[in-house]
Image (spheres, rainbow, N blue to C red):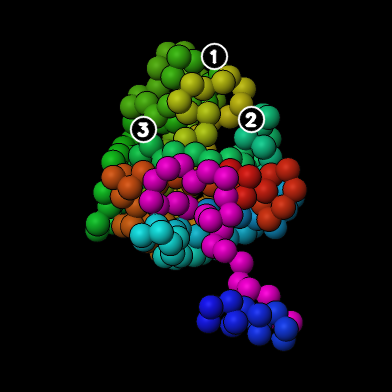
């Protein structure tokens, strides 16, 4: 009764109730108790906010947040994305594992693969290793269609694989979509954050809690609340 009275007073004074936390407004959070949201103002934006949340009892609580960068051509629905468009795919995705040129931050529980001189990410649509990490390039994966991970000393100091087009890769949809450390500007389709935020996310993410990442915008067809 007291809660209803307080709400009535706030409304009479013109104060609207605070919106529910973003995970509460989403149709799907992946079924786990940890969630990362990467949200831009609209589909043309190249910057936004990365927020990591966890469920405590029946409540979703914000654990941390950081400024984020998206693809240089903005964001696009993941199911219709095309490779080479420099767009960040929207949707809800698993986080299969992490990797990095530098050692894993203390407390990291995600599987963390160390980058070596032989580490590549194959993006060649003709290769059997399309959208996969490989140690040494296969004969059917051209170097011009792959990322030599050790070459990205800043961005891949620490990174997490985003499960876009990963389980059953569709050729031509895109490969190598990661959450990683900022470079000099917008990305080629990944999501990037400052290094201290990347390290904080790695120390927080717990595979036992089934973390996912939801990527989207405030509104419109790519609205994050749809996922």
Q: Which residues are magenta?
A: 14-36
The residue tagged 1 is 126
Label 2 sits on a secondary structure element that is helix
The residue tagged 2 is 79
Residue 188 in the image: state x and y as whole percent.
61, 42
Write the residue at 36% across / 32% down: 119
The crowd level at tag 3 (other Cα within 10 Å; few <14, some 14-19, many 20+) is some
- For residue 29: magenta? yes
**Location of residue 78 by image quarter:** top right
Q: Quadrant of the C terminus?
A: top right
- For residue 40: magenta? no
Mark closer to the chain start, 3 or 2? 2
Q: Is residue 197 above or below residue 147?
A: below
Using the numbered discs, state the Cα–Cα distance from disc 2 to disc 1 in whole angstroms: 20 Å
Which secondary structure dominates the residues rendered in magenta? loop
Name the side, left or right, on which 70 lies relative to 207. right
Write the residue at 53% across / 81% down: 2
Tell which of 32 and 43 is nearer to you. 32
* Residue 172 visible (yes or no): yes
Mark closer to the chain start, 2 or 1? 2
Contact flag, marks 3 and 1 (Cβ < 8 Å): no
Mark closer to the chain start, 3 or 1? 3
The residue tagged 3 is 119
**Location of residue 10 by image quarter:** bottom right
């Amino acid at each position: 009764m007291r809660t209803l009275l307080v709400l009535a007073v706030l409304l009479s004074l013109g104060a609207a109730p605070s919106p529910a936390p973003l995970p509460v407004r989403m149709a799907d959070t992946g079924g786990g108790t940890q969630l990362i949201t990467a949200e831009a103002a609209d589909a043309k934006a190249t910057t936004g906010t990365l927020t990591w949340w966890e469920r405590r009892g029946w409540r979703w609580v914000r654990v941390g947040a950081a400024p984020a960068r998206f693809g240089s051509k903005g964001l696009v629905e993941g199911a219709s994305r095309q490779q080479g468009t420099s767009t960040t795919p929207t949707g809800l995705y698993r986080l299969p594992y992490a990797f990095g040129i530098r050692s894993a931050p203390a407390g990291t529980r995600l599987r963390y693969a160390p980058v070596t001189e032989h580490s590549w990410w194959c993006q060649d649509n003709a290769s059997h290793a399309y959208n996969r990490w490989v140690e040494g390039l296969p004969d059917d994966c051209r170097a011009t269609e792959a990322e030599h991970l050790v070459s990205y000393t800043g961005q891949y100091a620490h990174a997490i694989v985003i499960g876009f087009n990963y389980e059953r890769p569709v050729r031509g949809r895109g490969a190598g979509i990661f959450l990683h450390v900022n470079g000099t500007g917008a990305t080629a389709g990944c999501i990037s954050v400052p290094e201290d935020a990347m390290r904080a996310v790695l120390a927080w993410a717990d595979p036992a809690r089934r973390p996912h990442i939801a990527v989207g915008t405030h509104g419109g067809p790519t609205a994050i609340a749809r996922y």
